[in-house]
Amino acid sequence: MNQFNVIGGVKTGVENNALSVDHLELVEDEDIRQLQQSSTISTLLPSCSFFLSIPYAPARKLIESNLPIALASDFNPGSTPSGNMNFVVSLACIKQKLTPKEAFNAATFNGACAMAMQAEVGSICRGKRTNFFVTKPLNSLAYLPYAFGQNHVDRVVINGDDF
């Protein structure tokens, strides 16, 4: 929507009850007001900013405006040839100043909300699909985003099956 210019995409998305508006590297106060009056989720794509060397979306400003944000990879060959969500979470913490807790929430539950799938996935609850990963031993979960050059994932479980 607002990747390179502010062109009214947020307003159009909100007016059409979009589940999410994506990119938002450029956000004006009017965009924030529009989002505050809606249930539309702001989906941020920090690995796109990294790859294209463009500004990062103002995650802190959105959060401080009481808006939920989601994180995604924007995995595509033109602007983000990586679907590595560990890196996305790391960038969100390092470049957008999210706390690890905020970044993990944005990448999991809020990401599910941005696709209207929060009843099925996005958190570990009875009745939801069993999707999660187990890390190698860490001192703290907060360490994970700052160790972006290492793979700390020991086991991945999708729909209850190990991968």
Image (cartoon, rainbow, N blue to C red):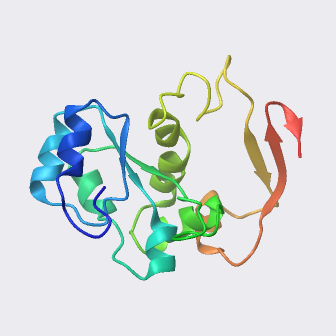
Q: Does residue 39 sit above or below 46 in this rendering?
A: above
Side (left or right) of 72 relative to 24: right
In percent of width and height, residue 141 lies at 64, 58
- Extreme top residue here? 127
Residue 43 in the figure: left or right of residue 12: right
Q: Nearer the viewer, residue 38 or 51?
A: 51
Quadrant assignment, res 53: bottom left
Q: Residue at x 58, y 35 (%)?
A: 122
Residue in the picture at 29% in, 52% down = 63
Residue found at x 50% / y 42%: 111
Residue sticking out furthest to the right: 162
Is 34 on the left or on the right of 79, as rendered?
A: left
Residue lying farthest to the front in this orientation: 78
Query: Looking at the picture, how far across and down is residue 115, in whole percent?
Result: 49, 34
Q: Exactly how many numbered labels are in the figure?
A: 0
Q: Is residue 145 left or right of residue 30?
A: right
Is 53 located above or below residue 7 in the figure?
Answer: below
Between 47 and 107, which is closer to the camera in this rendering?
Answer: 47
Q: Position of residue 55 (x, y in %)?
A: 33, 76
Residue at figure coordinates x 82%, y 60% from the top left = 136
Question: Can you give x and y, in whole percent of width and height, for residue 98 in the image?
Answer: 41, 62
| Res 140 quadrant in image | bottom right
Which image quarter holds the N terminus? bottom left
Q: Nearer the viewer, residue 97 or 31?
A: 31
